[in-house]
Image (cartoon, helix red, strand yellow):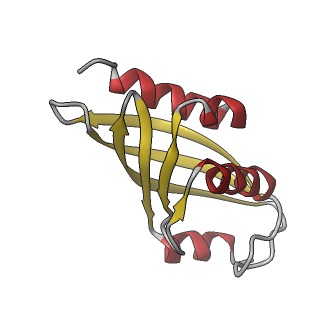
Amino acid sequence: MSIDVRDLLQGYFNALNDRDIRACMALVSDELILEPNQGFTEHGRDAFAAFLERQLHCYREMIESLVILVEPQGRHAACEYRVIGEYLATDDGLPEACGQRYEMRVGAFFEIQDGLIARISLHFNLPDWLAQVDD
């Protein structure tokens, strides 16, 4: 393994916690594939930057209890973590935001190529999240 995938992913999650889009973008491939929990697969850095901008606008989240698992060749990794968040602005197709707080467990799967994150697949319990923000 030419890079430390754990360090790469820890850096990515640190950047998310810091709400630092520039730092996140430095860790992903130009051909990044983003597979969100709900919705369509998005391709490329521009789509990922737009996703991050929307996330930062609509949500304030802190990632805690991060567990990183890496397969021996360092090409794939899985992470489990807890998100503690606040719903700040209404996201398209979701309930109206009014500062609701939520907590949820998230699973994320990563593909690593040439020392960068090439695919992110996010998974969480949307019905549980909806129940938490449905005020």
Quadrant in which the C terminus is drawn: bottom right
**Outermost residue, left direction?**
72
Residue in the image at 70% along x and 55% along y: 55
Tell me residue 26's x, y (percent): 60, 30
Residue 93 in view here: yes
Is 126 or 53 nearer to us in this picture?
Answer: 53
Q: Is residue 89 left or right of residue 6?
A: right
Residue 125 quadrant: bottom left
Picture coordinates of residue 83, whole percent (x, y)? 55, 48
Q: Quadrant of residue 69?
A: top left
Counting every numbered tag in the picture gives: 0
- At 64% from the left and 57% from the top, the residue drawn is 47
Q: Image height check: is 131 above or below 116?
A: below
Q: Is residue 19 visible?
A: no
- Residue 43 percent location from the top left of the image: 53, 59
Please provide percent x and percent y for residue 62.
62, 40
User: In the shown orientation, is residue 26 left or right of residue 8?
Assistant: right
Q: Residue at x 15, y 30 (%)?
A: 72
Position of the N terminus, as image quadrant, is: top left
Left or right, 123 with reference to 47: left
Up/down of 112 relative to 121, above or below = above
| Foreground residue among 114 and 104 | 114
Nearer-the-camera pick, 92 or 26 = 26
